[in-house]
Amino acid sequence: MLIVIFTVGGIKGQLNNISREQDGLQALPEQSIGQAFRSWAWKNRGFVGVTSFILMIILLVAGMWDLMGIGVYENYKPEQPIAYSHELHAGKLGIDCKYCHSSVTKSKHAGIPSVNVCMNCHRAVSEGSTTGTAEIQKIYDAAGFDPATMTYSGVTKPIKWVKVHNLPDHVYFNHSQHVAVGGLDCQACHGNMRKETVARVMTSADLNAVGTNDDGLEENAVKFTRPTLTMGWCVECHTKSNIDIAGAASSNPDSYYGVIHQRLLLDKRTYQDYLEDDVVTVAELGGLECAKCHY
């Protein structure tokens, strides 16, 4: 297209000189492409200025929009060393998430299940319903287990799982705070894993759809608009999540929210805000303080 434009511009200049010679006028000196463009731009400086400004705005907006995608990993689904199926284990077999991810209520990390946890079942179950014996044999290799003799050799081969949900190093997140204290179900952030095979980073649409398709799960209270695992996503949850402080205090006055309720009664300003809308959000309890997540 550029070649066509420059060619047409050159032909136009030649025709213009022929026309001037026929009219008895002196032909204009030949100009290079750069000189011709500068001459044209100066004659049409109003149009060129407005067009350049619009193009600059478009480029800036496009650049900012592209930069907003940095660190967004929705639908990230890495290949794992073992074809473990959440759909089979959590869905069809009904195994609780906390059985395999046992540290979720006690630690900041949910934890990757050890081979011993897998062997609790697979010491007896040596053949899978979809993958046969190949994938389960990898578990036996990791444990140093011989299913034929039902003995352990002591020679192990660690399973190199690939981490799926990654947060920046400067971000603090604690699973136990959200699960044990906040009472969140795993589905609130990880979606309906009963329908998933290998774990992936769910999209906001996936999280919003939990419980709406008769899948037996409680519907998520917060409807997300921000991409998963971004700061906006966390802030949105803290802003929209309501806490039943009075209910928690009545059931267990010594619990975390029971103590918060006692403090709330002494904080007239915050208590007045609570009386106005009958709602206390995580944000109102300091959930948006920078040091809570960036320490």
Image (spheres, rainbow, N blue to C red):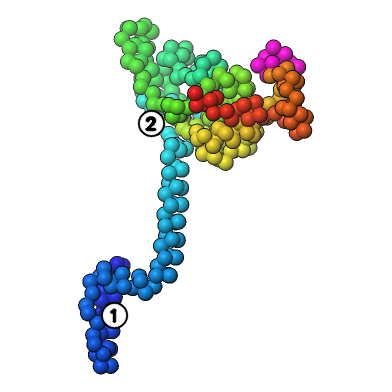
- Which labelled disc corresponds to residue 79? 2
What amino acid is found at the position of numbered circle 1 in the picture? Lys
What residue did someone put label 1 on?
12
Which residue is at a point 57% across and 28% down the rendered structure image? 289
Which residue is at a point 24% across and 90% down the rendered structure image? 21
Q: Secondary structure at mark 2?
A: loop
Q: Quadrant of residue 116?
A: top left
Which residue is at a point 33% across and 73% down the rendered structure image? 40
What amino acid is found at the position of numbered circle 2 in the picture? Glu
Which residue is at a point 43% across and 46% down the rendered structure image? 66
Which is more toward the observer, 199 or 2? 2
Where is residue 3 shown, x and y percent of the image? 27, 69
Q: Specify few, some or many for label 2: CA neighbours under 10 Å numbering under 14, 14-19, or 20 or more.
A: few
**Mark with earlier residue (1, 2):** 1
Residue interval drawn in magenta = 250-259
Where is residue 239 shown, x and y percent of the image? 63, 33
Q: What predominant SS class does the magenta segment belong to?
A: helix
Is residue 131 located in the magenta-colored stretch of the structure?
no
For the residues labelled 1 and 2, the Cα–Cα distance comes to: 60 Å
